[in-house]
Image (cartoon, rainbow, N blue to C red):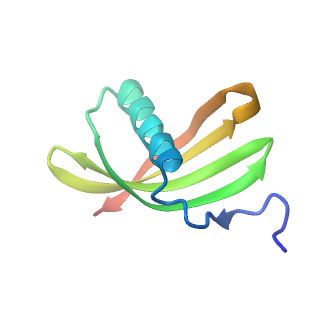
Amino acid sequence: MATVGAIRQSEGSANSLEIDALARFALDEHNKKQNSLLEFKKVSNVKEQVVAGTMYYITLEAADGGHNKVYEAKVWVKPWMNFKEVQEFKHVGDA
């Protein structure tokens, strides 16, 4: 049985449309705030944590000036409030 509030691997959803949409949302928010032009490539991993809603921990690849790089995004979603917010977006390495 999963521990309440524990971060766990999100089963079978790394390539789902919902997760892709959240990854693109995080990337778009980052691009707006940092005035950058990262281009989404794919989601490579996703974990989730039940909080007041769900916190998604998404590892994604994006092109930066023609070079693929790996980023981690933390996105908080409360669907009953139509709420989603990027909590963190950071570069973690090259793809």
71 horizontally vs 64: left or right: right
Q: Residue at x 23, y 55 (%)?
A: 68
Q: Residue at x 29, y 32 (%)?
A: 36
Q: Residue at x 61, y 50 (%)?
A: 56
39 horizontally vs 72: left or right: left
As drawn, the residue found furthest toward the bottom would be: 1
Residue in front for this viewpoint, 32 or 2: 2
Q: Position of residue 86 (x, y in %)?
A: 56, 36
Q: Quadrant of the C terminus?
A: bottom left
Total tally of numbered discs in the picture: 0
Q: Position of residue 25 (x, y in %)?
A: 46, 35
Q: Position of residue 75 (x, y in %)?
A: 58, 42
34 horizontally vs 64: left or right: right
Q: Quadrant of residue 13?
A: bottom right
Q: Residue at x 85, y 74 (%)?
A: 1
Residue in front for this viewpoint, 18 or 85: 18
Q: Position of residue 82 (x, y in %)?
A: 67, 26
